[in-house]
Amino acid sequence: MLLHSSLEAPQLGGRSLQLYSSEEGLVALGWDPSDRPRLEKWLARHFDDVQLFPAAGGHELYRSQLTEYLSGRRRVFEFPVDLRGSPFQKAVWHAVLEVPFGHTASYGQIAEIVGRPRASRAVGAANQQNPVPIVVPCHRVVGGDGSATGFGGGIALKRKLLALEGLVDAPAVQMRLF
């Protein structure tokens, strides 16, 4: 059983975020109601029996923390995430989760971290498939020159998220994760 709810996000140009969760945690976040067919197709690939139900009060933790983040009052999410994807995608997303609020990393740096130094394009493709953007902060992954490139919600939205964190076309920082 999967739950669905919406969250109005005026900070993101009035978008209505679409939230999907399983019993394990948040599984997907869409940018607006038009994302629903794409997300439902993704859910069908990753879950045996997709039955969507309104979340009612079941999404309050996700909704409150996302609202706090979008209002500049939260830097770290403290709720469970149920990541579904290939082993490589999950490795990339776990590396991206380590990029701190207010910092960026390049696609090449993430490729190095996951042990595939020549796979910066594959890192970009994995980020494009990130089912929980914002929570797995793929907006913090930038081009090698620090430019805001590639983002499922569009470059304008990526820039808004970076600006929310005090970054706009900030140079990538050297991550010291290991």
Image (cartoon, grey):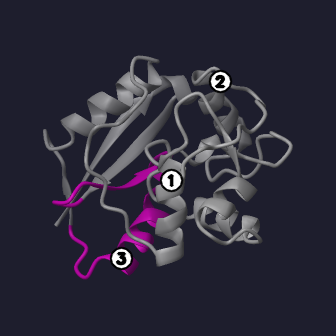
Q: Amino acid at mark 2?
A: Ala
**Residue 36 shows in this picture:** yes
Residue 36 against residue 48 in the figure, above or below: above
Q: Nearer the viewer, mark 3 or mark 2?
A: 2
Residue 67 belongs to magenta span:
no
Residue 102 against residue 37 in the figure, above or below: above
Q: Left or right: 7 with respect to 138? A: left
Residues at badges 2 and 1 in contact (C-beta under 8 Å)? no
Q: Left or right: 43 with respect to 156? A: left
Q: Nearer the viewer, mark 3 or mark 1?
A: 3
Binning the other alpha carbons within 10 Å of mark 1 as few (below 14), some (14 to 19) or many (20 upward) gives few
- Separation (CA) of disc 3 from disc 1: 20 Å
Residue 49 against residue 121 in the figure, above or below: below
Q: Amino acid at mark 3?
A: His
Identify residue for label 2: 163
Q: At x 37% / y 63%, what residue is drawn? A: 83
